[in-house]
Amino acid sequence: MCLSIGTQNSKGFISFSCAMSAMMKKRKRKVSKENVALTISSSVGEYGENSGTLPTDLMVEILSRVPAKSAARFRCVSNDWNSLLRSPYLTNLFLKRSSARPHLLITFQAEGKWSFFSSPEYLISDQNSNLVVVDNHMDVPKDYSFGVCVPVCGLMCTSNEWVLSRKRDARMMICNPSTGQFKSLPKVRSCRGNVITYIGYNPIEKQYKVLCMTIREKPFKFKAEEHQVLTLGTGKLKWRMLECSVDHYPYYHGSICINGVLFYLAMKSESKEYMTVSFHMKDENFMFIPNQDLLSTLINYKGRLGGIRHKSFGFMDGGDVGFELWILDVVNQEWIRSIHVLPPMWKDVVGETRVYFVGIIGSCEVVFSPFVKSNPFYIFHLDMKSNSITRVEIKGTGPLEGQAVYTFVNHIENVNLIM
């Protein structure tokens, strides 16, 4: 039986057909209490055509396993399919299963648009290949400069737009690269000219929230004020004011969200001490963790908060000989430090390319990326266990070069709609 779902591209059709074949071999137990069947058209022979039905529980199993890009297209098949793909059960099941197949995500702005590219993350670790071909997800119209927050459970948010664009009417934007959907956020209520934004996710309540801090440059350079938060998926979007007991200067980089807690790097306003700020997504309260040194990047290290420190702080190149890995002991609120010495071939492989620490994939594999798009474009894979470094060429991002590029690991595909 060959299933027909209208005019789909070949990737979407093949993905659906493969999922159908696998599911028809072994029927899973029911995952929905509803005994509803979806009608699909099926071709029989070369000229004949008949109709068949599939129970909803089987459709849920199938659609939760196809690529997010294909699932997003399947909404156009019928109203029934659209309703099913919007159901909280299916979107949550898809997100759960997507977490087991993370992606590499690359994004940059060029020629008046914001472009997204991704590829399955396991391809970076393939020792038999130093080439990864990425797939273009979407292009969002954007005609001025902006920063990008670390993606959380499939969603991304622009950040510090006012700083880079110098436009007071600039508005942050939420984007889902998997579905091709984007949405502008309400204008931040402030008379300040600069703003820093972070996005987080509460897995218990299944809520996304955007944390925003306006920045006062004078007389205090980069002091955070007017802390505000916005909850997605609640109908009309609205910023709500928050109280923060400690004055601090947040950095424009280094955030990470782990198990419903958003972490970002900062410095105390009076003592100038380095610290990591934690913002709990559920309770919307701030806590402050002292740092012995200034960390350059916060990472998710096997489900625990980690940080990276190296001599040049903002970047690394072939002249570096190692870096420090810091892991937070949550019980004692103390950082545990370990030092990793880079392999001798690091200097030859990286050369003069300025790279930053993207994150850790698997159990002990580090990914580094350049700050600027080049042609050809390379990222670097460090296996800390074998202490070997590999240069991986990224194909599919086009011939453009010179743009600020953002590279992320552990990106999860998500079919959840922002509206």
Image (cartoon, rainbow, N blue to C red):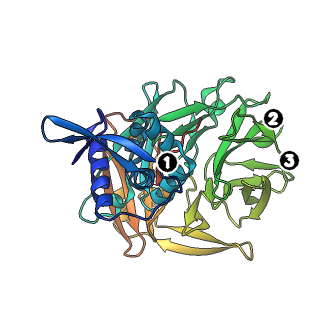
Is residue 357 in view from this perspective? no
Residue at image location 37% in from the left, 64% down from the top:
346
* Residue 38: quarter of image: top left
Depth-wise, is mark 2 or mark 3 nearer the camera? 3
Is residue 211 in view from this perspective? yes
The secondary structure type at the circle numbered 3 is loop
Among the two numbered marks 2 and 3 on one chain, the one whose residue lies closer to the N terminus:
2
Name above or below for residue 204 compared with residue 145: below
Amino acid type at image mark 2: Lys
Disc number placed over residue 243 in the picture, else none: 3
Q: Which residue is mark 1?
A: 414
The secondary structure type at the circle numbered 2 is loop
Quarter in which the C terminus is drawn: top right
The secondary structure type at the circle numbered 1 is loop
Q: Foreground: 181 or 190?
A: 181
Name above or below for residue 392 compared with residue 114: below
Residue at image location 21% in from the left, 40% down from the top:
43
**Left or right: where 26 falls relative to 143:** left
* Residue 184 place in picture, x, y as percent: 61, 30
Among the two numbered marks 2 and 1 on one chain, the one whose residue lies closer to the N terminus:
2
* Residue 409 place in picture, x, y as percent: 46, 55
Amino acid type at image mark 1: Asn
Name above or below for residue 333 compared with residue 348: below
Q: Which residue is mark 2?
A: 218
Q: Marks 2/3: CA distance?
A: 21 Å
Neighbourhood count class around disc 3 (C-alpha, 10 Å): few under 14, some 14–19, many 20 upward: few
* Residue 62 place in picture, x, y as percent: 38, 53
**Left or right: where 36 falls relative to 9:** right
Residue at image location 73% in from the left, 76% down from the top:
331
